[in-house]
Amino acid sequence: MIHCHKSFLVNPEHIRTLDRTSFLLTDGTSVPISRNRYAESRQAFLDYCGRHLEVF
């Protein structure tokens, strides 16, 4: 789980995209990312993506 805002935790399996202010989830929901948590949220998401890449 990624703690991206005081009021939100996000399961990285359901994140479709990341932008400067929010995560967009696979169901279309936009979850805000606080300015204070942006760097750690971004890094956690990139770490998750890196662990789930397939090498061809």
Image: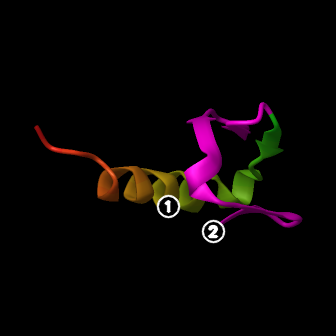
Q: Is residue 33 above or below residue 27?
A: below
Q: Residues within 10 Å of mark 1 (few under 14, many from 20)?
A: some
Q: Which residue is painted at 32% across and 59% down in the image?
A: 51
Report the amino acid beneath label 2: Met
Which badge, 1 or 2, comes first in the chain's sequence? 2
Determine if the magenta segment contains residue 26.
yes
- Tell whether position 38 is magenta: no
The disc at residue 1 is 2
- Between circles 1 and 2, the one closer to the viewer is 2
Q: Nearer the viewer, residue 35 or 13?
A: 13
Looking at the rendered structure, the number of numbered marks drawn on it comes to 2
Amino acid under label 1? Ala
Q: Quadrant where the C terminus lies?
A: top left
| Residue 20 % position (x, y) | 65, 35
Say whether residue 52 is left or right of residue 29: left
Magenta region: 1-28
SS class of the residue under badge 1? Answer: helix
In the image, residue 18 lies at what x, y percent? Answer: 60, 37
User: How crowded is the residue under tag 2: few (<14 C-alpha within 10 Å), some, or many (20+)?
Assistant: few
Report which quarter residue 55 is drawn in.
top left
- Residue at the location (85% across, 67% down)? 6
Q: Secondary structure at mark 2?
A: loop
Image quadrant in which the N terminus is located: bottom right
Residue in the foreground of this view, choosing between 54 and 2: 54
How far across and down, in percent of the image, does residue 43 sit? 47, 57
Dots 1, 2 in contact, CB < 8 A = no
Q: Which residue is mark 1?
A: 44
Spatial CA span between label 1 and label 2? 9 Å
Image quarter for residue 23? top right
Tell me the tag on residue 28: none
At horizontal 40% and vertical 50% (from top left) the residue drawn is 49
